[in-house]
Image (tube, rainbow, N blue to C red):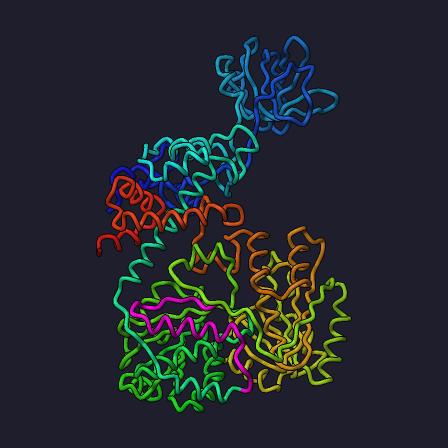
Amino acid sequence: MRPEILFPLFAPATSLSGVGPRFAKLFESLVAGPAVIDLCWHLPSAIIDRRYGPPLAEVIPGRIATLTVEVGEHRAPPTRRQPYRVLCHDATAEIELVFFHAHRDYLMKTLPPGETRVISGKVEIFNDRLQMTHPDHIAGPDEADSLRAVEPVYPLTAGLSLKVVSKAVHAAVERAPELPEWLDPALKQREGWPDWNAALTQVHAPRDEADLSPLALMRRRLAYDELLANQLAIALVRDRQLRQKGRRLKGSGHLQEKVLASLPFALTGSQRQAVAEITDDMAAEHRMLRLLQGDVGSGKTVVALLAMLAAVEAGSQAALMAPTEILARQHFKTIAPLAEAAGVTLALLTGRDKGKARQAILADLAEGKTDLVVGTHALFQDDVAFRDLAMAVIDEQHRFGVYQRLTLTSKGQAVDVLVMTATPIPRTLMLTAYGDMDGSRLTERPPGRQPIETVTLSLDRLPEVVTAVERARNKGAQIYWICPLVEESENSDLAAAEDRYRALEQLFGDKVGLVHGRMKGPEKDAVMARFSEGEIAILVATTVVEVGVDVPKATIMVIEHAERFGLAQLHQLRGRVGRGAEKSSCLLLWQGPLGETAKARLQILRETDDGFRIAEEDLRLRGAGELLGVRQSGLPAFRLADLAVHGDLLATARDDARLILEKDPELAAERGQALRILLYLFERDAAVKFLRSG
């Protein structure tokens, strides 16, 4: 149950004055949630400084000024199409206030002739006269001090004005209760941080530009609170994982040896180390939860197979789950000859398997006749049962939710889990998303892999690129051609895959194929199969080919509008070539003018093919929220913390969380009780239930 002290913050935003049902939907999309707390987390992005208030004769045009004036003559126009003007003055000069579509009665009441008024807005020169069009504020002289202030500016959405958003946010912040302190006193003192409530109030009342910086004291305090909630939740999940009874899976090594003997190459040093780390984990008493990170083409599938064979050697079954049918078939194709060499039975289960064929696969799994199974989310379905599932490998974890991971592991007893990703993850994201896992990294390429030459070219040189592609095709090369959209949309000038396909088809006939996300699975697979077998020379595609597709003869990757892709995504796409012994090239076609970030991105890709360095740079350039599909990926989207800036706080939060649980594993002490409130405040409620279960 959420603590009562937080009830005011988790009340619906409609409980605030001025937020009716009409605005509620707009606010929910603007602040990413329906509650009062979501408005509290909506931080100002700029300020309007109204402290500038000189005499009229000294006003600098173009600035926002707050001026005390005497109201003079009202000049109403003959028609409402023309502006209504009010002349005002002080002892030094005159200014004209201009209103369009004005109501005379309202303006006479607001600006009575002969009275003193304080006006605030942007001052401009028009026809050599000072003027202010539609002042932001008009008030009596007694309100001058409240107007001469710094006003926060919030991000907006269509239908919500700054006035409405500011009023709602400030009403939300006023609801915030005094909460017990959950910070370590020594850390709070060292950093000079205010209390939580004071930090929240100050962050919404910036005094200058420096207060908007993520490095400002109150912003760092709130960012740390969010990171501590995240790290504490992860530590609780991990503690539970380690407390859960596992099973020792210790193989004899005889099946692994058969596979190693059949490989045409020796394992790299980091592959050997990863296999050792994984098999040691499997042989321990606790349940394994390990992340295997390997750059594109670093040989993760072989490592995963060797780990699964350890489970088979111990008399159990293992499953490998992939996010797409293309990827599942790819893994199956890679593993099949190696499984045959080891003498183990292997099956493939996807959503396409129906009727008697599917029933036969399920029967063999349930009876234990199948040792290893590769599949898609079809493996989750209720009628899929194993005789003894002891090991699950989950590929491209960021495509699956935690729920799906748990569903698969519930099909066995104390199932060991190995998660694989070809998306190199920066260390800071590793800690926030996968802090409950141990990590293994593959940092080397298998022998014989050629480096990929990366070239950046303006789209103006497209005809030269087409000529180069034709030369390469005549020599037997295969080519990927990547476009960002499926078809031209009204508001986009991006080269569409279908248009590019038609243009290339006119030149190369039936040697050109097309795959995109809107195609049905079987249709997509048929085109991919024709490309793999060399019937198609040029494959035009959207980013569906990003992960896992292996065509050794493909040696050229053309990416149109490379400036529109993220760094990690460009790196993933580039990794589709260079998988054979031939020299490979990647052509990044950009359309100017290029912004600084896009330039930096293309420069990094020319300089390095180290996925881990690229991932760190991507985080620095784009921030965690925009990293490869983070929004859809189950990676945490932080509201207050910016991992590119607050990396030092993350490391501190991680150490703090570990110490907290060492001293007070049930969060029962005074600080522990405050930390429970912190977990609820940042909606990490799921972790609290692990405390209750002891």
Rendered image quadrant of residue 674: top left
Above or below, comparing residue 259 to residue 143 in the picture: below
- Residue 59 visible? The answer is yes
Q: Position of residue 196 (x, y in %)?
A: 38, 35
For the C terminus, which image quadrant? bottom left
Quadrant housing residue 104: top right
Judge from the rendering whether residue 143 lies leftward or rightward of residue 681; answer left or right.
Answer: right
Quarter location, residue 567 = bottom right
Q: Which residues are magenta?
A: 264-293
| Relative horizontal placement of residue 157, taking residue 12 as reference (left or right) | right
Instruction: Please state the total of marks drawn on the protein image.
Output: 0
Q: Residue 352, position in %: x, y?
A: 41, 81
Above or below, comparing residue 164 to residue 516 in the picture: above
- Would residue 285 be counted in the magenta stretch? yes
Q: Is residue 641 above or below residue 603?
A: above
Residue 172 can be seen in this image: no
Which residue is at 52% across, 76% downward?
299
User: Foreground: 506 or 53?
Assistant: 53
Q: Nearer the viewer, residue 57 or 671?
A: 671
Residue 671 percent coordinates (x, y): 29, 40
530 part of magenta stretch: no
